[in-house]
């Protein structure tokens, strides 16, 4: 099922030709009309005329989130503020936030991208979708809202919080799709159980569009089996526009709308462009943005470009699901560790749930890593030897997957924090010493 088959199934030659035309026009316009971009290019020794093919994009300098913060609030905008019809602000935790402006055309492309994405996972005008991402400064809620309305679905703009009320509405309105973080959906499933609501029996939910935080295939399996649904990954950032791209029904990589974005994968240390299938840092160039163009913007997300066509028939480039970020990667005793790796390892232990907390500390000169993990209520035992057996198996599996020793501490079900927005599962105490 396609929303715009002419674009979604375009031949590769057409894709590359039109991408190059967009790139060449974008670079020339920015160099001629924006002092920041001209300064970046001059400092890098590159002129618009040097871009003679798509591969020449690697000659252009990278953009970083600090560029947006340093030019806060609107110095990077390439249109007058009278053309801005909406602002969104990123949820940064340090320093200045990043402010993104949108023209009407920017919003149109964003909505078009989400209409394609939601159609690809099977959402139609017969669905009712509950949008449980935050509305307001965060891009998630409004982005999904307008994309769902574009395909004709009925939208329940529930935002976050009031979980019991959300569950009541889900049942009463016969909600068939939900968009939220994977953490929040797991929380909803748990609260539903306490309310006597069985997702499989009492709801009509069939599709979940989940994102805003890394999650694993093991977590997907738990969600799908618990709720009796199909769960799809969604990807995007406020700098790009917001959540824009999803997996299709094949669940084999996230499709990127080729007419809107040009992706690259680079070595995060050297900046070298990597080939298809090689894992590295995702870099995006937004080909159509008017208010705040992004050229070779380093997202810090770790993924790889999938080579070859998708079984769904779409010819757009695909990326593997995000496995982590280069800037929330932990280095423990010289080993790179992502929270998603910890989650994957924990879910190999049937007695444990997907709720965990990572703490890294330094004792003397030695880094130590602790993972608190909740035990499934059905697996709980009063016998110390049973609990020690679970703990020992979990520590062995963690050593296998992470290649470092990790101390596991078992916690009662429901004792660790639950998150209605992005999960915050890492405490790095070393920065406090």
Image (tube, rainbow, N blue to C red):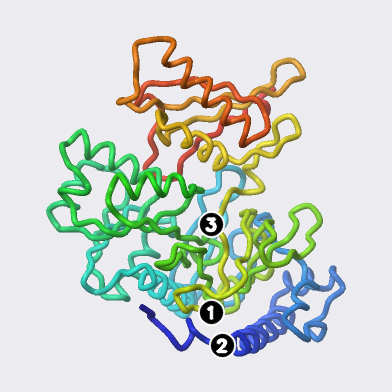
Q: Residue furthest left?
A: 172
148 left or right, relative to 85:
left
Q: Quadrant of the C terminus?
A: top right
Q: Quadrant of the N terminus?
A: bottom left
Along the line of sight, the residue nearer the viewer: 164 or 251: 251
Label 1 sits on residue: 315
Along the line of sight, the residue nearer the viewer: 84 or 49: 49
Measuring 55% from the left and 81% from the top, which residue is drawn there?
Answer: 259
Number of labels in the image equals 3
Mark 1, secondary structure of its residue:
loop
Choose top left, top right, bottom left or bottom right for residue 331: top right
Structural crowding at the residue carrying mark 2, measured as other residues with C-alpha within 10 Å and reported as few (<14), some (14–19) or many (≥20): few
Q: Is residue 290 visible?
A: no
Structural crowding at the residue carrying mark 1, measured as other residues with C-alpha within 10 Å and reported as few (<14), some (14–19) or many (≥20): many
Q: Position of residue 381 (x, y in %)?
A: 34, 16
Q: CA distance from mark 1 to mark 2?
A: 7 Å
Mark carried by residue 321:
3
For marks 1 and 2, the one nearer the N-term is 2
Q: Are marks 1 and 2 in contact (CB under 8 Å)?
A: yes
Along the line of sight, the residue nearer the viewer: 15 or 37: 15
Label 2 sits on residue: 11
Choose top left, top right, bottom left or bottom right for residue 270: bottom right
Choose top left, top right, bottom left or bottom right for residue 428: top right
């Amino acid at each position: 099922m396609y929303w715009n088959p002419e674009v979604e199934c375009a031949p590769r030659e057409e894709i590359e030709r039109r991408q190059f035309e967009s790139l060449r026009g974008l670079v020339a316009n920015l160099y001629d009309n924006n002092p920041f971009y001209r300064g970046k290019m001059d400092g890098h020794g590159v002129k618009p005329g040097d871009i003679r093919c798509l591969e020449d994009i690697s000659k252009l300098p990278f953009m970083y989130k600090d560029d947006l913060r340093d030019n806060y609030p609107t110095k990077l905008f390439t249109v007058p503020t009278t053309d801005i019809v909406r602002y969104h602000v990123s949820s940064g935790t340090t320093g200045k936030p990043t402010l993104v402006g949108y023209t009407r055309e920017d919003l149109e492309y964003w909505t078009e991208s989400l209409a394609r994405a939601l159609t690809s996972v099977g959402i139609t005008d017969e669905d009712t979708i509950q949008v449980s991402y935050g509305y307001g400064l965060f891009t998630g809620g409004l982005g999904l809202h307008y994309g769902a309305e574009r395909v004709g679905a009925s939208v329940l703009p529930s935002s976050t919080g009031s979980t019991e009320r959300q569950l009541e509405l889900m049942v009463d309105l016969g909600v068939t799709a939900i968009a939220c973080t994977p953490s929040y959906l797991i929380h909803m499933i748990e609260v539903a159980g306490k309310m006597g609501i069985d997702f499989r029996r009492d709801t009509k939910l069939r599709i979940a569009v989940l994102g805003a935080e890394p999650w694993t295939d093991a977590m997907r399996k738990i969600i799908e089996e618990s709720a009796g649904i199909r769960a799809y990954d969604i990807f995007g950032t406020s700098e790009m526009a917001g959540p824009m791209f999803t997996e299709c029904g094949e669940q084999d990589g996230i499709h990127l709308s080729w007419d809107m974005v040009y992706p690259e994968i680079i070595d995060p240390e050297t900046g070298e462009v990597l080939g298809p299938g090689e894992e590295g840092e995702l870099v995006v160039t937004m080909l159509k943005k008017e208010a705040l163009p992004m050229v070779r913007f380093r997202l810090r997300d770790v993924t790889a470009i999938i080579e070859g066509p998708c079984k769904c028939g779409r010819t757009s480039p695909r990326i593997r699901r995000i496995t982590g970020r280069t800037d929330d990667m932990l280095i423990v005793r010289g080993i790179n560790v992502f929270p998603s790796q910890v989650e994957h390892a924990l879910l190999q232990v049937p007695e444990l749930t997907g709720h965990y907390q990572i703490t890294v500390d330094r004792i003397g000169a030695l880094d130590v890593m602790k993972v608190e993990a909740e035990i499934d209520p059905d697996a709980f035992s009063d016998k110390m030897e049973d609990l020690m057996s679970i703990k020992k198996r979990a520590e062995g599996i963690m050593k296998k997957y992470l290649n470092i020793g990790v101390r596991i501490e078992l916690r009662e079900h429901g004792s660790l924090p639950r998150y209605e927005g992005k999960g915050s599962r890492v405490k790095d105490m070393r920065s406090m010493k």
